Amino acid sequence: MIPSKRIPSHPGRILRFEYLEPLGISVAGFASHLGSDEEHIQALLREELPVTPRLAWLLGMATGTGPELWMDLQTNHDLARNRPKRTLAKLVG
């Protein structure tokens, strides 16, 4: 369920505060582990880039969570950020 009063955390924030910082893993080390560009991971952590399906697979393998978690985090974040200001009536036939 998408919260109506707040925007769910971006996956980059979750990655930084729940995985990298507690484990003492550097961005450079993590990017190298993923086989990814360090600047790409930095942009994710700055919440400037979304998690793509390919990245979700890599994050899932690296964290032991599976790709679905990372895609769900991104989807919930995106849906909440793009919630329409107005409501629409349901179509009836």
Image: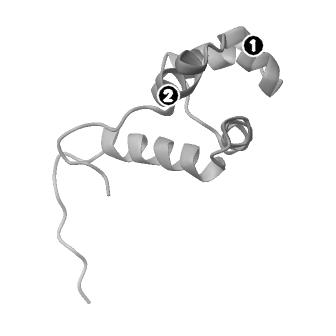
Frontmost residue, 90 versus 8: 8
Residue at 83% across, 24% down: 35
Q: Position of residue 42 (x, y in %)?
A: 60, 13
Crowd band around label 1 with a 10 angstrom C-alpha radius: few (<14), some (14–19), many (20+): few
Is there CB contact under 8 Å for labels 2 and 1?
A: no
Name the secondary structure under disc 1: helix
Q: Is residue 91 left or right of residue 68?
A: left
Q: Position of residue 80 (x, y in %)?
A: 32, 44
Which residue was labeled with disc 1? 29
Residue at 60% across, 53% down: 68
Frontmost residue, 23 versus 10: 23
Amino acid carrying mark 1 in the image:
Gly
Name the secondary structure under disc 2: helix
Q: Which quarter of the figure has residue 82?
A: top left
Amino acid carrying mark 2 in the image:
Glu
Q: Position of residue 27 (x, y in %)?
A: 66, 12
Residue at 46% across, 25% down: 13
| Tag shown at residue 18 | 2
Residue at 62% across, 46% down: 65
* First-in-chain label (2 vs 1): 2
Q: Position of residue 24 (x, y in %)?
A: 61, 13
